[in-house]
Amino acid sequence: MIAEFPPGLLMIAGAIFVPFVRGHLRSAYMLALPLLGLWQLMLLDPGTFGAMPVFGFELTHVRVDKLSLIFGYIFYIAAAIAIIFAWHNEDLAEQTSALVYVGAAVGATFAGDLITLFVYWELAAVSSVFLIWAGRTERAYSAGMRYLMIQILSGVLLAGGAVLLANETGSVAFNNIGVDSLGGILILIAFGIKCAFPLLHNWLQDAYPEASPTGTVFLSAFTTKLAVYALARGYAGTEILIWIGVAMTAFPIFFAVIENDLRRVLAYSLNNQLGFMVAGIGIGTTLAINGAVSHAFAHILYKALLFMSMGAVLHRVGTAKGSELGGLYKTMPWTTGFCIIGSASISAFPLFSGFVTKSMILTSAAEEGYLIPFLVLLFASAGVFHHSGIKIPFFAFFAHDSGKRPKEAPFNMLLAMGLAAFFCIGIGVYPQPLYALLPFPVDYTPYTTTHVVTMLQLLMFSALAFGVLQRTGLYPPELRSTVLDFDFSYRWLVPKFINWFMDAGARAWTSLIADLFENLNRFIATVFRYHGPKGLLARTQATGSSAAVIVTLLLIFLVALLA
Amino acid sequence: MSETPKNKTAPEESPTRTYWLDDIRNVHKLFWILVAICALLFASDAFYEKHVIFPFEHWFGFFGLFGFFLSFALLLTARELRKFLKRDEDYYDR
């Protein structure tokens, strides 16, 4: 029976009962939901169900195939890990919205048509904003508002594109879309916003670091990877995605190097990793799609691990700014170790998860002869090692001793990090089970001499560059600062323009009104002069004086007659 | 951000305890170990048959040199970018 229940709805319905249980029981109940979901996915047979006609269109609530299943699995695994990490948290708003958010992401993954996708898409946007607001600061509130506006815009574009497509083809089925029609382009932009394409990306770096230590772990897993799934479904082999993806891998790393808030650094590196997946989807060969999907799978785990380690630091120290941290390895050795495992995974060190997944994307780029994309991806691979592989663990746990001696992270946080670390190493050492889940049959061996040696050369020489620059004092130090990014346009430029416009408008209005009143006053004064109480035309004469005038006239007349 | 730090310090930690990494000579040691690893990796290109696709990938030590020089360029460019992009911490809050 459970196999007939739409996968996402399980979590959403489950969220309703969260307020009725308390304490550890509530956390245990929350953990049971994704595990139940995972079990359900294992029972599902490929195919579709839950079809219903709406306004003459055939909606398919659930479509099960290998592509949707692998994202479903990893979403539930990530949810379980994040729930363990947040075990101590008793914030009801955060807990409930997290479950709805997970359910919406899973539901969207299994949506067989664009209308169902749209509903879950918007639900994911609305439920996730509460995780940002759970940061409970003024900054979190405004960042959440900006996040919500941008996410809703993505949903509106998706709905608009779906209507245009339905008009054109008569079907709302969610399959390969392509960019040959306006509807297709609108939907690509909708996906692109959620996937943080260049210039559409800034909601990510803006909002994620403002959420609570636990909220960011949830956020990092779902929204952007849902977009990766949607791109893989609708736009595989669309060439422009290669260039978009390549740009996405390259430019965030410059920002990541100079950003001070380490959770914001992770948001930039998240953006950079999405670029690898988008480029893989653009290349579109079976190897490239397998690479993109498996990289998303591995990425969710190591990115969650990195956000958890920084969340644990934030939880214990109260800040995650590089300029305030350092030397924490002395009292947080486990967190340090887990963070380094996450760093090694994202940097694609041999025996760690990133190595066996990212290499598929790089190899497919080379095989298809994309020279410049290949070189940029290689550069970005070195770059990601700098900001996530070295910078994060180095400035948080080593560097100069900040004198801070926080206690080791609580047990539930360590357990969650340990689980994620286990998966990171497990996938790296023994990738076959992951490869078996991929949408296409895998004919790829990651561990060849060439590949291991060249990757180690790339990484070790990058580390050497870091070492040399550190010793010569040329390495950009951690400074308390804000780094301007594209959000400058809508957080500074546009508000300034609106202010200027309103100021100038107000001035114009004031002078317009003043002129108007002046003319009106002049008009009234003129009327008053002639028709007012003392006006010439309004003067009233006494009856007596009229009689005197008539008598005078008669007198003149008489004199004239007599004369 | 709002969460107040709990149990700020570890009680068993004595402030005078020194660690292996506290000694700057050991940090230097680590650096020279890294240099040695790089040298070995660079030389190892002579000992296996590279299976790569683009011709330039066959150049001796290509990946090492690529990693070193582009990282160098990345970090120094980012450092220069600060001149244009760095603002005060409360820039948007004012």
Image (cartoon, coloured by chain):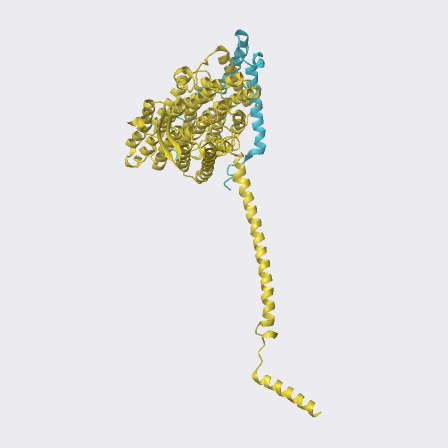
- From the viewer's perspective, tell me whether residue A216 is left or right of residue B63: left
The answer, for residue A421, to whether it is visible in the render is yes
Please identify the residue farthest to the right as the structure is shown: A563
Left or right: A262, with B13 as reference point: right
Left or right of B80, for residue A123 = left
Q: Is residue B62 left or right of residue A359?
A: right
Q: Which residue is at the far bottom? A: A562
State the quadrant of the C terminus of chain A. Answer: bottom right
Depicted A133 relative to depicted B72: above or below: below
Comparing A240 with A304, the one in front is A240
Q: Position of residue A264 (x, y in %)?
A: 47, 31
Between A423 and A242, the one lying in front of the other is A242
Colour assigned to chain A in the rendering is yellow
Q: Is residue A73 above or below residue A13?
A: above
Q: Quadrant of residue B54?
A: top right
Provide residue A292's location: percent of width, then percent of height: 46, 22
Residue A542 image-quadrant placement: bottom right
**Residue A34 image position (x, y, % from top left):** 33, 27
Q: Provide residue A76's location: percent of width, then percent of height.
A: 36, 26
Image height check: is A452 above or below A481?
above
Residue toward you, A519 or A207: A519
Residue at screen point 61% across, 68% down: A526
Which quarter of the image is occupied by the N terminus of chain A?
Answer: top left
How many numbered marks does the figure carry? 0
Residue B7 visible somewhere in the drawing: no
Q: Colour of chain B?
A: cyan
